Each structure stands twice: as C-alpha cells, then as structure tokens.
Image (cartoon, coloured by chain):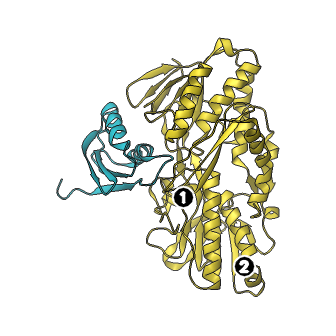
Chain colours: A cyan, B yellow
Amino acid sequence: MVNEKIKVIDATGSFCPGPLMELIAQLKEAEIGEVLELLSSDKGSAQDVPVWINKVGHEMLGSEESGGVWHIRVRKLK
Amino acid sequence: MKILIVGGGMGGTILANNLARRLHEELHAAKARITMLSASERHMYQPGLLYVALGQMMPDELYRDQRRLLEPEIEFHVDPVEEFRLDQNQVRTKSGKTYPYDVLVIATGSRIFLEGTPGLSESAECFYTEQSAVHMFKRLQEFQGGRVVISVGVPHKCPMAPLEITFMLHDYFKDRGILEKTQIHYTYPIGRTHSLENVAKWATPEFERLGITYETLFNLKEVDGRGKVIRSEEGTETPYDLLISIPAHKGMEVIEKNGLGKGGWIPTDRYRLNMEGRDNVFVLGDTTNLPISKAGSTAHFEADTLAGNLAAMVKIGSPVRNYDGKVFCFIEAGKDRATYAMFDYQHPPSPKAPTKSMHWFKTAYNRLYWASARGLL
C-alpha cells in the first residue's frame, strides 16, 4: 500500500454525471487490483459509493472528509 | 496565429464560427488563420436522433453541408487526423498531409461502444446513429405489447436521454393503444433514477404515477438474447421482450491510438480547457475527461468560452475567462411536455414542472440549432 500508485478522480463540482457515475466509468478503464481515489464535494457520495462498491464486489478501502471534500478509496477486484 | 480545429461536430463548429466572427479583422489581415479538419462533409444534429427513433423527425432533417455552415474565412478539409505530433505542433492526416499549428483544438467527440457488452449489439435497439434510430422506429411499429426494458451504460452521451426515451415511449405506446399490454421497466447505474438528485426527485414520482417500474444500481454486464434476459454487474437480472439501450460510450480511437487519453478521453483542465501539460492544446465537448455531462450544450458553452479566450490570445496575448461548468439540458417528459436542467460547477439544477411551452421551445430549438452552429445563438 505504501508504494501503491493511486489514480485520483476529481469529481468535485460534478452534479451530472456525478461522482458515483464517474467512478463507475473509471473503474471500467482500470486494471484489476488498481486503487482509485474519488474526490467528491457531494456528501451523499460518502453513503452512495460504499453501498454500490459492496453490492458489485469491489473493495472499499476508506472514506475521509477534508475541507468539504470526501476522499473515497476503492480497489478494483474484478 | 494558426488555429487548427480537429473535429467538425457541435463543439468544433460553434468554436470555429464564433472565433471567425471575433477575429474578422485579423483573418482578413492574415494575422490569424482558422483551419478545420473533419472526418465528414456533413454535420449532424445528433439530438434529433431521439425523434427519428419515434417517427417524429426524418433523418434528412438532421444534416447540413459542413462547408456551408462555416464562415467563408475558415479553411475546411475533409481529412481526418491520424497522428497528433504535439511536440512538433503539427498533425498528420489520412491523406498524408501535415498541418502545423500555433494553437490546436481537439473536438473529435465520442462513439457508442456496443462491443464492450456481450450480446448488446445483437439484441438491443438504440438511437445513437441514423441507421439504429430508423431500425428502432421500425421495431417499435411492429411491437404489439410486452416488457420493454431500458438499459443504461456508463459513460453515455446526453444524460437526459434515458429519462426522455422512457417518457416518450410511454406516450408512444399510449397513442398506439397498447400501453395496457406493455410494461416499461427502467434500469439505472446508480442508486436513484437520475444522476442529478433534483431531477431524480421529479422523475421517480412521475414513473410511479405512469406505472413505469424501475431498478437502480443496475450496471449492464451482458445480454442473453436467446433467453431474453439482461444481467447486471451487481448480480441481478431482468427479462425483456424489447430492449432499448443507452449504450456506454468511448472517445474516438485516434485519441487512444495517439496516447492522448485512456478510453479516448483527454485529461483536460476544467477551467482553461487546455489539455493537461499542454498550454497550446485545448479540448472541447465529449473529448474531455471532465466530470460533466457529455452533451451538446456542454460543448456549446465550452466553445463560447474558448472562442473568447482564443480571440483574446490573438488580440492581447492572454485568455480572459474560465469555463464555469455551465450545462443546459432540455428534458422531454412525454410527447408534448418538457422541462430543463441548468447547472454549473457550483450550482445544482432545480428543474420545474414540465410544460407544453417548454416542449415547443425544444421543438423550436431543433431548428434553431443551425443558428447556434453558425455561432449566432
């Protein structure tokens, strides 16, 4: 994890398609095992993203809020 | 200053014409030059395909001759770019010619990516090309009732299209007298019926009022055309008699082949619209990787901003404004009612109740678009 390269998706200010849709699109392009960090200014993402991640079967690594921006880290598992 | 625009779609065309008007003096004094390279001699009004699929517009109404749309000072060639040589400030085209530039604008758009989902191209109807929209209309005419499922891929062009086709199909089946024999089932990738929360708050009770069923967190994984079932990445499945697809999109192959952006989407500065790491390369419309709607209006407002900035770079040597993320989308809510969503990076939309007058405004805009393309509106 220390030297792991993390792809950052800046979805702050994104109302449409919105942070979760951005994450879904970027996960399609990612390699299995790759870690993505979603930046979202929408507080709903902190709930929506983990629900979807758990349902679809990727790994939720963490979610932290800093200065009104949520940093949500996800590992692609399939 | 040599300005080279690659792509003759909505973004490239609005930019070229807007810029030509702003740089009228400089173009005539040979202080500036605008060249456009496109893959087609025709310009298509893509939002019209939705209406073709329902028999409300004819395909030939969607096209104009690209050369005749452009201001006469703009040099235009049907000669698609095959190689971007950004370090040398030039591109090489299919014909083998090399075009140098001082400023490059890439507006190559996006394409449907049916082949990314097993079974989709063989089994689904869609309306993102002329051929498929006409095919869909003929299939709808033959349809006598059953379960109609709408599936939505990610990312997709025109974020209102899933809702619009659903509401318009409802009214189409009602007018044909087969609504009682038809069940419309809407699926959507995230946890509500639309990515815009306020639009979802309006659409969900509309679905319930009209008897349209819906299933959220449904990302299409595959289509079983024999069993007439679609399956999701989330592990669920739903049967269909008629499958309507809003397919996932990709950027153009030439972008990926030249290593400009994964998936064909070019990393772009959200305010200046320049390609990340390149001060003299700008990106418009669907081609960007920006987290905003892939829609004609996005390209339109980006083009307005960029035209102002490129003209200012010619006149005073620096850009003058940022793109604020503005998007305006009509939302057809049936055959004769519509609303709209307008938003930017800072302000979410708050759509109003649909009205007939907004529908007629959209119908009028389907013609007024040609004034937009000419940089007049």
Horizontal and vertical percent position of residue B58: 81, 39
Q: Please name the residue shown 76% across and 79% down the image.
A: B24
The kind of residue tagged 2 is: Leu
Task: Label 1, secondary structure: give it.
Answer: loop
Horizontal and vertical percent position of residue B118: 48, 32
Q: Please name the residue shown 58% across and 62% down the image.
A: B284
Q: Looking at the picture, does residue B281 appear above or below residue B225?
A: below
Horizontal and vertical percent position of residue B352: 63, 40
The kind of residue tagged 1 is: Gly
**Camera-side residue: B9 or B14?**
B14
Q: Residues within 10 Å of mark 1 (few under 14, many from 20)?
A: many
Q: Please name the residue shown 52% across and 69% down the image.
A: B272
Horizontal and vertical percent position of residue B305: 61, 67
Q: Please name the residue shown 32% across and 37% down the image.
A: A53
Q: Which residue is mark 2?
A: B23
Tag 2 subunit: B
Tag 1 subunit: B
Q: Is residue A40 visible?
A: yes
Label disc, if present, on residue B325 of the rendered structure: 1
Q: Looking at the picture, does residue B232 appear above or below residue B4?
A: above
Q: Is residue B41 visible?
A: no
CA distance for labels 1 and 2: 25 Å
